[in-house]
Image (spheres, rainbow, N blue to C red):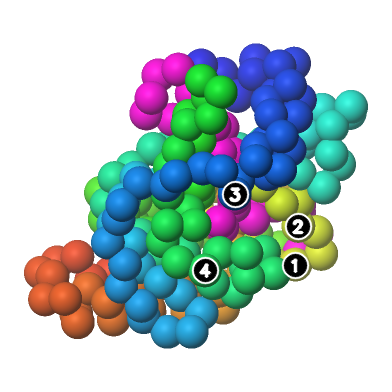
Amino acid sequence: MSLRTLSPVLFTLFISVNVLAQSSSSIDSIKNTIETVSNEFQVCVQPYALCTSAPCIPMPTDGNPDLMICQCDVVNSGHMVSLSALDNIVTDCESVAPFSLNGVDYIYSTYSTKQEPEEHRRFMTCDSIYTWSNCLNMLCIINPDKVTATCFCQKVINKESVTLGGRCIQETCEDHYWSAATAYAANQATAYLNAWLKKNNYPDSLIIESRYCRD
């Protein structure tokens, strides 16, 4: 499914996200594993949307100009959520558990290092002149193929970013609106995730030292 062919119908999906926000108190989330790493992060083991290399497009003109539409992978593994993102709406793993409402399957975008070793990806730095997308803790709709999700991410301007998208082709920073983060946030998140893996005796092969295109 092409990202650009989705855009004519995505505003309707965005409306359903707003309806969902008003109904969230009545949703029973699935059980999951919770491990507190710090006051800012938690590591969860449950399905999530992984957007670390996702290309994005701006919301159509009749939608919210501060949102971007990103195509992400649906993954079931350990991942990390930020408790400080989105004005502390997220309080634990249950807050970002997948759920269904009115026949639509929803999932949240969070963070893991899964794509770095498995897809041999490195962080590419994009200059602050390029717009990018912040997908951390963002709500997504699972696509009919069940292995990808359409995520509604925050538009970010005037900040340098790093992304696992682009395969180190710097020119893609200009028009792909990559799902990304600041270098500080990406490094901090990876450090906390690695600490959790060590604490829980996971194999050293899963502990990733992030690499950049310049390395």
Asked if residue 166 is positioned above or below residue 136 in the image, the reply reads above
The residue lying toward the viewer, choosing from 107 and 190, is 107
Q: Which residue is mark 2?
A: 156
Residue at (19% x, 82% y) in the render: 199
Q: Which residue is mark 3?
A: 25
Q: Nearer the viewer, mark 2 or mark 3?
A: 3
Dot placed on the residue nearer the N-terminal end, 1 or 4: 4
Mark 1 to mark 2 CA distance (whole Å): 7 Å
Mark 4 to mark 2 CA distance (whole Å): 24 Å
Secondary structure of the residue carrying numbered label 3: helix
Q: Amino acid at mark 1?
A: Lys
Q: Which residue is mark 4?
A: 91
Tell me whether circle 1 and circle 2 mark residues in contact (CB < 8 Å): yes
Dot placed on the residue nearer the N-terminal end, 4 or 2: 4
Residue at (13% x, 70% y) in the render: 202
Quarter of the image where the C terminus is located: bottom left
Q: Amino acid at mark 4?
A: Thr
Q: Nearer the viewer, mark 1 or mark 3?
A: 3
Q: Amino acid at mark 2?
A: Val
Tell me whether circle 1 and circle 4 mark residues in contact (CB < 8 Å): no
